[in-house]
Image (spheres, rainbow, N blue to C red):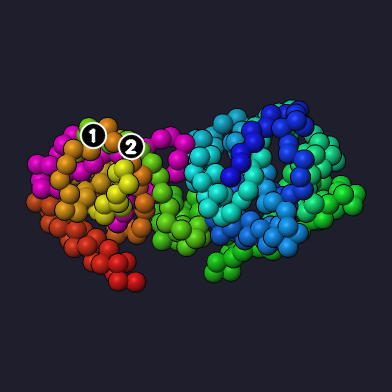
Amino acid sequence: MEVINIHHPLDERQIPNEPVVLAMGFFDGVHRGHQAVINRAKAEARDRNVKLAVLTYDHHPALVYRPLEPDDRKYLSTTERKLRKLDRLGVDRVFLVNYTGEFSAQTPQEFVDNYLVKFHTVAAVAGFDHTYGKKDVATMDKLAGYAQGRFDVITVAEEAKNQEKISSTRIRQALKAGDVDLANQLLGYTYRSTGLVVHGEARGRTIGFPTANVLSPEDEWLPGIGIYTARLKVGAIWYPGMVSVGRNVTFGDNRPITVEMNLLDFQGNLYGEPVEVEWHHRLRGEIKFDGVEALVAQLKQDEVATRDYFKRVAAD
């Protein structure tokens, strides 16, 4: 897959002189709704015997319009992961635009003239709620007017789960609530985050449940506080286990949130390893126990539940 990094104003020398079907969107998470858009564009590109291209952005457009809020720094898929998913979906070319104030200042007509036409678009494909400027004037139902017959416009209908729209916002809300099962259903795949294994307090080792402490980047979403079944990828190998997102409240108040994963049947030194965490299922919330014995008893139950979960997954 070819990735073309673009900064406004467009340097037309960057753009190959060949027609494309263009899917448009920010595509954070590349969830099932996004996949429907890209697959519709892929089918159109195949029918027209042209390449499939995607227009997306290097950061969320909200950063240009208002002061930063904590959630603005977080993504369901970093740019690198988004590009990998687009590649797997069969995209031939990505126009990765640096979303700046100057870029956002274009009128819808200027955006179409300066970008969609110069990308050699023969058909533009996006979701029904996609906008490419101010929401009242840059809607999909008005795009054909701006196109002026130079390319076709294809609008993809809403994808829904339980009669609710599948959206990045809904997935983020599910993750905040710890509902990774719903998040994974909406994504269409098992959610992953990345991190680095670092030293913790080593308390888990003393109670028979050693953990890998995963320092996670600030720009990735993590599930809310709770205990989960998960897999940890080290190198090319995936290890099943149970992971805690929490404050270790049994050992004191006002502690920082940590991500600590106990791997099943694993022995080794993981310090310094870059890892991926694949979030499968929420077992329970965080509990403040009266002492270590009660905590260990619960961890043993969690281990049984985790082993049972992965046995069922392997059997499916």
Up/down of 96 relative to 166, above or below? above
Q: Which residue position holds label 2?
A: 274
Identify the residue shown where x is 74% and y is 49%: 20
Q: Position of residue 52 (x, y in %)?
A: 67, 52
In the image, farthest residue toward the right: 148
Cβ–Cβ below 8 Å for labels 2 and 1? Answer: no
- Give the number of the disc on residue 261: none
Position of residue 219 in the picture relative to residue 33 (left or right): left
Up/down of 315 relative to 32, above or below? below
In what element is the residue under mark 2?
A: strand
Q: Which residues are magenta?
A: 201-230
Identify the residue shown where x is 18% and y is 38%: 269
Q: Position of residue 123 (x, y in %)?
A: 78, 54
Amino acid at dot 2? Pro
Separation of disc 2 and disc 1 at Cα? 9 Å
Dot 1, how many residues are within 10 Å of its Cα: few (below 14), some (14-19), or many (20+)?
Answer: few
Q: Quadrant of the C terminus?
A: bottom left
Residue 226 in magenta stretch:
yes
In what element is the residue under mark 1?
A: loop
- Give the number of the disc on residue 271: 1
Question: Is residue 133 something one can see in this rendering?
Answer: no
Identify the residue shown where x is 21% and y is 48%: 262
